[in-house]
Structure formats: structure tokens, C-alpha cells
Image (cartoon, grey):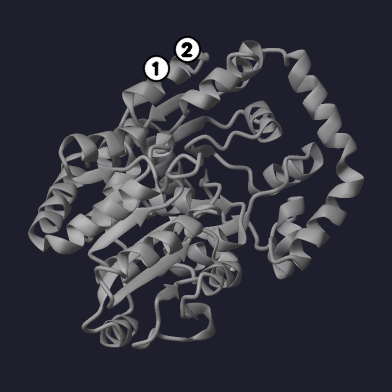
Amino acid sequence: MSEKLTAVLRLYRLISAAALPIVPLVLSRRASRGKEDRERVSERRGEAGVPRPDGVLIWLHAASVGELASVLPLIERISSRGVNVLVTTGTVTSGGLAEQRLPRAVIHQYVPIDVPLYVRRFLGHWQPDLALFVESDLWPNMIIETSQRGAPMILVNARLSENSFHRWRHLPRTIGNLLARLDLCLAGTPDDALRLSDLGAPRVVTTGNLKLDVPAPSADSKQLMQLTDAIAGRTVIAAASTHAGEEDIIVAAHKRLTGRFPNLLTLIAPRHPDRGPSIAGTAAAAGLHVRLRSLGELPDATTDVYIADTMGELGLIYRVAPLVFMGGSLVPHGGQNPIEAAKLGAAIVHGPHVWNFAEIYAALDNAHGAELVADSERLTATFAAWLSDAKTAAQVAGVGRRTVEALGGALEHTLHSLDPYLMQLQLRQRAYNA
């Protein structure tokens, strides 16, 4: 890549390099707070935890749990072609998901902090032949150093919100310089494609949202039976992937609903499970009986609010709760993924702040496969209406499931666009093995 760096990128490079002495301190503090994997923190400094396998290597980077979950089927399909695959993520929770769900032959490492020395150390060891970045996690040093090594870079399931687009328009040459280093951008929606093209991304293709092709999350059969037995006979609603400020709303809704539905049980699965105890405090302060799943507790007949503050169990929650509020939408976060809940037959209600999944929520709302509410009063009213009319709730759930199924196909479109790169690497791997 011959394009010169802009002044902003040169400044970023200087500042990130100068920050090198304090990064170990930051990592140590994060590890003490559970934000880093203590045993693997060296990977965040670009130090490899395992040897590089011989032959071709494809590197795929997914920032966190949501991004990694969306590309698991893609990783499986690429790995099945007989090439080495390295997956990097940046959070402890995504590392846990990688350990559970990645194919056995796929290597997982934590991505290095975006400091030039760490990135060069990482790339010097792994020497990727192709780099795939998921959604929008584009760190400047990572992009610049990879482009200088000549490895093709492709953005898959590319996403750029309207808010991010307007922010980047204040630095058009900087974002243009980074995007121009990519070989290909596979956008999740036509709107994403248009915004990326306007900012300077080359060869933008709309392939669809890979999250729509992810199978519905599984649930441990024993755990499902235990929870089903524990809540038998109860009226159940759930709030999934909630953020700070939303649990107060859910607790208030629960208290209003119990006037009509005295047997009501509300399940709350916070987006960040470590917030479980504080949410329990909020519910208890409102006079409600609370139990925490992280403590190994199950709800009993006296439980009002059951907090599912564990990782990887939304599949369990969606199977036992016919009505689900999707979090991150009554506060300005951008909304959480409704696809899994819809695939598992939940009737979905959500707030107005859903720009992270705007196309999917619009499709659901337009088809009456979900319900948009503006505030806590409308949320309570919608739950009350659906709890009083199971037939209507089931119709909403059915439409929601069919809507997300009809939007699928992104995996095959993505593989078709990647095929020229993958075929070339397959041939090189076969030649190496011969």
C-alpha cells in the first residue's frame, strides 16, 4: 500500500507508540478486574501462545461475543477447506465462547493491543495470508501494519451506523486512507454499503447480515428441564441483554403487572452478567424477592425476579419465556440482536434505539413480528395485552420467526464473494502438503 498516512494517522501512530510503557500497567489493572485473561495476557502484547502451523493461514478477527457468534458458521465452512485458521477476539467472554464453539482445528488468540510494536510482533509470528475483519473493528495500526505486509484484507458482515458515518465524515481523509487499504467490503445491508462507499471503501458488495444465518442457540437439556420444572405454572416474561437503566424499567413494569397477573415471574438476563448483584439490589429495594442464577439458585414459588447473570444461556431463557423485551433499546445503546429470540419463538417487544440492527427491527415491525414501544408505560401495556391474549402473542412470535428466516442467505453470499481468495489459498496449501 503506497498511500501516505494522513496527519491524524501519523499522530495516532506516535501516541500509541509512546503509550507502550503504560500498557502493561493498564493490562494488569484490567486483569485484576476480570477484564483480561490473566493466564493469556501476554497475547495482548502480541506474544503468541502457540506455534504457527505450517502452510497457509487465514486470520479472522471478531471483537467480542456478538461478532464471533455471527461468524461461527463462516469459520466452520472456511476451516473445512483444509486451510489453517486463526481467530482473534478482544474480550474474556469472547475467549470463553471461542473455547466452547470453535472447530477443534481452529486456533484462538487474544488480539494484541493496537500498539505498533505489539501488532508487528503478532504479525511477525502469524504471517497471515488473508485477513478477515468482522463488522467494524478496524484498529489503525492493525490495518496499516497488515497492509504493509501485503496480506489482502476483507471486511465481512461490514456495518457502519448512521452515527458512526457522521462522525467519520469529519475526518474523511483519515477513514478513507484506512478503508482504501481493504481489498473488499462485504456489507450487511444496502445502507451499510452506501455509507462505506461514501467514505472511500473499495469494491463494496452487499451480502446480507450473517447474524441471520446463525442457528438458534442451544440449551443444555438438563438445565432446561430444571428451570422448566422450577417455573411450572408461573406466568413468565423476560428481559434479555439489558443495559443500565433498563432494569429499573423492567422492575417497575413487573410491579404494575402483578396487579393483574399475581403469579408473574420476570427473568432478567443482563448484557453484562457481572451486573447481576447490582440488579438484584435494585429489585430487592423495590420490595421484590430475587434469586441469582450465578449463585446456582433456581426460582421458587416466592421469586418475583430471577436474574440470569450467566454467560451463554440466552437459548435457555428464550425457550422458557414466550414474551421477551430486547435490551439496549430503551436506552440509547443501539439495541441488541433480536434474531435468536425470534428463531426460538418468542414474541418480541423493543424500544426505539435499535440502530445496530435497524434493518432487522424494521422488517420485524413492518410485518408485525415485533412491537415497538416508546417508553415504560407502553412496555407494560404491551406485556399486559399479550399476557391477556396468548393467541395474539403467538401470532406475533410466528410472524417474527418467519421474517428472520426469510432474511437469511448471507452465509452463502459471503462465501461466494470470498471464494476467489479461498480457492487460491487452498491450492497453495495443497501444493505445500504435496
Question: Mark number for residue 194?
Answer: 1
Sort mark 1 into few (<14), some (14-19) or many (20+) by Cα contacts within 10 Å. Answer: some
Sort mark 2 into few (<14), some (14-19) or many (20+) by Cα contacts within 10 Å. Answer: some
The answer to whether residue 207 is left or right of residue 194 is left
The answer to whether residue 205 is left or right of residue 269 is left
Q: Quadrant of residue 277?
A: bottom right
Q: In the picture shown, does residue 93 fall above or below 422? A: below
Residue 349 in view here: yes
Q: Position of residue 178 (x, y in %)?
A: 61, 22
Q: Position of residue 398 (x, y in %)?
A: 12, 53
Q: Amino acid at mark 1?
A: Leu
Residue at point 84%, 49% (across, down): 23
Residue at point 24%, 68% (across, down): 260
Question: Count of labels shown?
Answer: 2
Residue at point 87%, 43% (across, down): 20
Element type where label 2 sits in the image: helix
Element type where label 1 sits in the image: helix
Q: Looking at the image, which residue sits at the far front?
A: 259
Q: Amino acid at mark 2?
A: Asp
Q: In the picture shown, does residue 151 fall above or below 88? A: above
Q: Position of residue 312 (x, y in %)?
A: 43, 67
Q: Nearer the viewer, residue 237 or 134?
A: 237
Q: Which residue is mark 2?
A: 198
Q: Are marks 1 and 2 in contact (CB under 8 Å)?
A: yes
Residue at point 25%, 79% (across, down): 234
Q: Nearer the viewer, residue 408 or 50?
A: 408
